[in-house]
Each structure stands twice: as C-alpha cells, then as structure tokens.
Amino acid sequence: MQDQLESIYQQALHDMEGVRDAEALQAWESQYLGRKGQLTLMLRQTGQLPPEARAGFGKRANEIKEALQSLHLEREEAIRQAELARSLEEGAIDVTLPGRTQAMGGLHPSTRTLRRIQQIWADMGFQVYRSRDVELDEVNFTLLNMPPHHPARDMQDTFYTTQPDIILRTHTSGGQIRAMREFGEDGTQPIRVILPGMCYRYEQISTRSEIQFHQVEGLAIGKGIRMSDLKGTITEFARRLYGEHADVRFRASYFPFTEPSMEVDVQCFLCEGHGCSVCKRTGWLEIMGCGMVHPVVLQNGGYDPNEWSGFAFGMGPERITMLKNGIEDIRYFWGNDLRILEQF
Ligand code: PHE
C-alpha cells in the first residue's frame, strides 16, 4: 500500500504538468483529491493496515494530500493569470471604444427659469424674500383689499384647510404684506424684494392650468416711486430675460391690490410679432400682472400712503418656460416624465 501511495503521488504530479485550463484542473482534482479520488480512497483504507504501520502511512498520506492541495491552488492561480493575459492580448478590453456616459441629473426646467429670473432681479438690487405656502385667508385676500365676499376672490379658486382662516396661498401677493411688515420697520424703510414660491389653486387641471405652479412676486416701496419707475424696471427685466430687442407693452387691467393695474406683454419671440400659433396671431405674449401698490395695501403693510408709494408685479415661471421652449401642456411640469425632463 505504501508503494501504491507513492505511485499515485508520482502520477498526480505527472498529470498536473498537462493541466492547462480550469476544466482539466477540475478533472485532476476529482481524480486525486475528490470524494472518490485515488488519494482519498487510499486514506480511507488506512484502517486495513496492521496497527503498527498505520501511523506512518497516515502521516505520509496526509503530507501528500497537503502537497497536492497546494499544487492545485498554485495551478489554479497560474491558469487565472494566463487567461487574463490571453483576454488582454485578444483585445477583450478595447481601449479605443468610446466610454459609457453616466446618466446625469439636471435641474428642473422650472428651477432653471426661476434661477434666471432671480438672478436678473438680484442684479437690479432686489432681495429674495420667502413667504409661506400655507397662509392666512386674511393675508392672501383681506389685507390685499379683498374683504370676504369680494367678487375678485372668485378669480382664484382656493384650497381651504379644516381651519376656516388657513388656506394654501393662491398667489404670492400676500407676501407683499409680510415683507412690508417685516422689513418696513413700521413703514419707515424702503423695500425692494422678490418673492418666489409655489401657489395653489383648486382648478380643473388642463393643458393650461395646474393646481400648483410657481409665481415670482416683486415689490418696491419708496418715496416718490412712480409708474414710470415700474414701466422702466419691467422693460429692463424683459430685455434681460428675452434679449436686448424685446419689445414690451402695458395693457390696462384690474387687480384689487394695485391701482392702476396693468398686464405686460412681450413681443412674441418666436414670430417676432408677425403672428404665429404660440401668440395666437396677436404678435404678443402675456408675461405678468403689475401695478402701483394700492393705498389700502400700503396702509395694511404699515406705510403712510401719503408719503410712500410703490409698485408690484407677479409672473409665472412655468408660463415663461412654456413660451420659451414651445411646451404646450403645463401638466408636463409635475408629471415626472424623464422624456421631458431630460431635454433640459
Ligand atoms: N397676484 C396676481 C395674480 O396672481 C399677479 C399680480 C401681482 C398683479 C402683483 C399685480 C401685482 O395674478
């Protein structure tokens, strides 16, 4: 048996020399070291030897087993290296292939427009004031010269909460009151702020109206501020947003919190005023509402309307983005459809 053991060992060493790949290695392993391998069977027969021979045989058999196991490990590593070298040589990694681009996140189109608008107003000396989304009915309506039952309240269908006097703001104009009360120091300080934020209206969702949308409100309070200041400032803003040659016009309108009130149109930048489907053949696009702050509103903000005056405006970044990019459905903004969002 001792001789048989040694010859198995020699045979295993010899066979290993011919092992070149993982498959052959596997076969070698099961032939010698596996559950039914020759060495394993030998070890199992130890018990048949006369007792005095067992220890010596067992010791030698285990030595051989360990030697073959480490030989197996060595060869396994060598085969792995050889395969790697071969795959490199065969060009399995082609370094001339273009890389795979990583999918990158981006800013939402509304955020982009909002930032652009904020930058322009910041350059003109307007500071950002964040008012609240959940607002008092009093601030959103009453203090803006819309007492309960005022017909103008119907222009903005409102989300109410379970508390009768707390609503979701329907526009950012209520922030005018908060900004005046916070920054005005009892009506003694001038103000120049913009108020960006989300607004909510209980409306039938359609291509043109969503139940939530952004507005950017603006407010300037000072002594001797006149309508020419409003017109000049808005015109400058439009030129910075739409380009130096952008033409604007002011149309008389009505808001309870401004007097006089106007709507601002910019010349259609798609057809340059000739008339197209986006401007509905008028050559003009409406971009905001504005006006001189109503004396009642000034008073509610803590200012004496005999000494102080101001202007206010409000615009919708989604609408501006739609016009600019030919987006025809406002529902795309909160639809989270990557096919839309990836285009920006
Ligand atoms: N708050 C008005 C709206 O939601 C817009 C506006 C703001 C008009 C400021 C005049 C002055 O339509």
Image: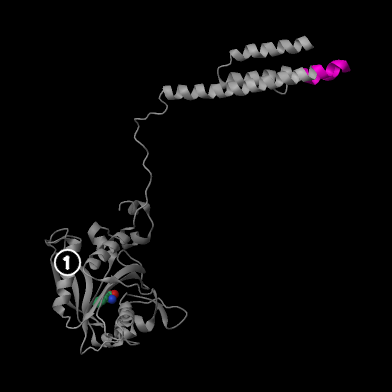
Q: Position of residue 37 (x, y in %)?
A: 71, 19
Label 1: which secondary element = strand
Q: Splitting the image into 4 quarters, where does residue 300 fall?
A: bottom left
Residue 207's place in the image compared with 45, above or below, is below
Q: Residue at x 63, y 11 (%)?
A: 14
Whether residue 172 is situated above or below residue 30 in the rendered picture: below
Q: Quadrant of residue 242?
A: bottom left
Mark 1 CB in 8 Å range of ligand 1? no
Residue 57 shows up from this direction: yes
Q: Which residue is mark 1?
A: 266
Q: Nearer the viewer, residue 306 or 317?
A: 306
Is 149 left or right of 277, judged from the image as shown?
A: right
Magenta run includes residue 45 = yes
Q: Is residue 41 visible?
A: no
Residue at image location 72% in from the left, 23% down from the top: 35
Residue situated in front as seen by the camera: 292 or 159: 292
Badge 1 crowding class, 10 Å Cα cut-off, few under 14, some 14 to 19, many 20 or more, is many
- 4 horizontally vs 112: left or right: right
Q: Amino acid at mark 1?
A: Val
Tell me where the magenta segment starts and ends, as one range: 41-56
Q: Residue at position x 75%, y 18% from top? A: 61
